[in-house]
Amino acid sequence: MPIWNPWHGCHKLSAGCANCYVYRRDERIGKDAGIVTKTGDYNLPMKMNRKREYKLTPEDGVVFTCMTSDFFVEDADEWRQGCWDMIRYRRDLHFFIITKRIDRFEQCMPSDWGDGWDHVTICSTCENQDRADYRIPILLSLPLKHRRIASEPMLGEIDIDRYLATGLIEQVVCGGESGPNARPCHLEWVLKLREDCVKNRVPFIFRQTGAVFVKDGKTYHVERKYQASQARKSGLSYIPEEEES
């Protein structure tokens, strides 16, 4: 799973940012995650090895882009066009961009975007109903070939049935919050989101329980190393039959 971080650092924007893992990690090494800086991996998609072969190849899988920042953060406006140029050129790769700033997409997209690029997926986060009702309508209105939704950290029950009914969302992912100050994730929230996905035949991934998981009124404190495996063992992830075959 290749990760491309052309810049690092971000600004907290909504409730889901309160316990940001990037801030938490940077604080441990005395770094200010609120300062956005261009990284040495800025041109990673164009980097080659000694054989003059690209370091990133289609065999590596989807390129997860800007995972320690936000691709649409204002501080990176002067650098973003260069990234779009590299993304445009590397059409042999698929770039996955997750953002809390979907409302900035139109002012940040390249001039030749048209109705979207086949090799780019845009995923909007929505940690609660308020952010779902603000961000998802914007996501649906944009010229995109691939749209996804992520509710991580999931901070409350979310009803997105009407959004999934459009048939424009390709996948929904949810998960709890990690870290020492993690807020609880409730099983019934996960089940409600799964129910909406099953009803509309949209793939659903329960990625992790988070550090504090509430089931049947009982609170469980889950160690980091077990959070993803416990979610997998739950069997709650859902893939429509035609996508399994």
Image (cartoon, rainbow, N blue to C red):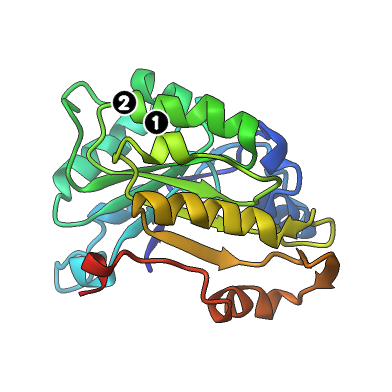
* Residue drawn at 65 percent across, 50 percent down: 154
**Relative to residue 80, is residue 59 depicted above or below?**
below
Residue holding disc 2 = 142
Q: Residues within 10 Å of mark 2 (few under 14, many from 20)?
A: some
Name the quadrant containing residue 159.
top right
Q: Nearer the viewer, residue 211 or 31?
A: 211
Residue holding disc 1 = 139
Amino acid type at mark 1 = Leu
Question: Quick check: marks 2 and 1 in contact, CB under 8 Å?
Answer: yes
* Residue drawn at 27 percent across, 43 percent down: 146
Distance between the alpha carbons at the discs numbered 2 and 1: 6 Å
**Relative to residue 76, is residue 62 depicted above or below?**
below
Could you say where residue 197 lies in the image, as x and y percent from the top left?
43, 52
* Residue drawn at 59 percent across, 80 percent down: 229
**Relative to residue 38, is residue 113 depicted above or below?**
above
Could you say where residue 104 lies in the image, as x and y percent from the top left?
44, 23
Name the quadrant containing residue 186.
bottom right
